[in-house]
Image: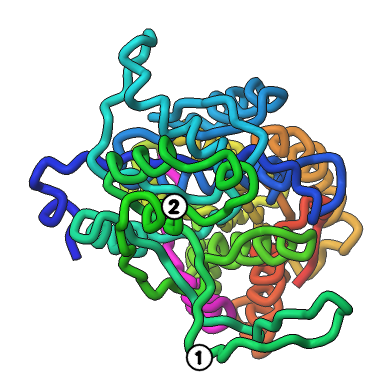
Amino acid sequence: MEPGNVLSGGASVAAVLPAGGSGERLGGATPKQFCALLGRPLISYTVRALERINWISDIVVVVSLENIETMKSIIEKYGHKRITVVEGGMTRHRSIFNGLKIFPESKLSSCPLQKPEVVIIHDAVRPFVEEDTLLKVVLAAKEHGAAGAIRPLVSTVVASSADGSLDHSLERSRYRASEMPQAFLFDIIYQAYHQCTDYDLDYGTECLHLALKYCKTNAKLIEGSPDLWKVTYKWDLYAAESVIKDTLSQQVCVTTDMKEDAVQLGFLLQETLKNEVKQVKGISVFLCKNDSRLQNIFLGQCYNFICINAKKSDIKEAQQLVDKLEKARISVLHPVVLISVHLNVSENMSFSNGMEELAWIKEFAREVKKKNILVYGLLIHYNKDDPKLQETINSAAAIISALIKDRNPELIGQLLVA
């Protein structure tokens, strides 16, 4: 389904993200939308999920008054575009209404927003929404006036009596859980909010119900994917971080210097990593000034790099790669893993001497961590005639796999040995 074709009729689409919750169920002083995942606020991931879709013209983020400056600083730090921050209300519905009002009322402001034909409403704490799902609900809203994602119920819903006893239960197969995103013809949902009662605004939570109750609009229900879940409790933060780590670990780039041993090791590691890490793409490039292939890798959003250097005491290759990563701004949104691999090809050199030559890694790692680049050292005893070479390569691949999957900042600067 190509959005350029289906939205080519001139339909404008905007999004409203209510983010004014206090996160009581999560516990802790920080509202869940501002909790950090791999060092970056959760809401930034959700904003990015919408921002990368070019047919969404404007994104309105609704936050409480005390968090407006926090939200603005997040927008600036992570380079978010097309974002307008609006003060929220005391309840979810009042916050959404404030977000909607910014469109018709923005003509009076210094930065007017175009009133969209379709508006998406999505939770700020659902960071994994995909473009395909958003497109489906937008198209359904254009046709039916309103649409929303749903998911099968996991547990049976029961009603209790006044004394706490079971009153009745619902037939689970007949019901669905209402999820986000939802989409509406703007005029319909705006009219519904204008007409609804204070009771609805203070105690209601379902936007689709308002469209039905006040505008007689029967929403089209769209079966959503499992990744629409909402971060609600503390364990959801751990689950969300795990999902992000898994996504970031899918591709690895292997860079080498010009030495024969380094090139050969790079090839062997690349082939072995294809078996070690699920769906990983191994790419070998020479780290020279104008290698366009490296720039293409950056554009492909690779966040894992293995820099192989035949000289243990040489920091130049790793520094050159860090400079390129920084220039490409790869590490602004996600932490980048850089594993500096060094070859020990001399059988006469002692282990302690080899370690001393690599003492620079710890200080180097500490410095580049400020740029959101996580550097680890890996020493490989390399002899191309060694019958146990593949065993050494397998060990190195397992270490690399663990480092890029875990992305542990506490291990930076450590020198591991394969």
User: Residue at 85% across / 51% down in the picture?
Assistant: 27
Residue 372, percent across and down? 66, 40
| Image position of 324 with respect to 181: above or below | above
**Residue 271 is a magenta residue:** yes
Identify the residue under disc 2.
Answer: 210
Identify the residue under disc 1.
Answer: 173
Q: Which residues are magenta?
A: 270-288
Residue 256, percent across and down? 50, 55
Marks 1/2: CA–CA distance: 24 Å
Whether residue 165 can be seen here = yes
Which residue is outermost to the front?
162
Left or right: where 237 falls relative to 335 = right
Q: Say which mark, if any, is on residue 333.
A: none
Quarter of the picture holding the N terminus? bottom left
Q: Secondary structure at mark 2?
A: helix
Q: Secondary structure at mark 1?
A: helix
Mark 1 or mark 2, earlier in chain: 1
User: Residue at 50% across / 64% down in the picture?
Assistant: 179
User: Residue at 47% across / 42% down in the picture?
Assistant: 196
Left or right: where 227 falls relative to 34 = left
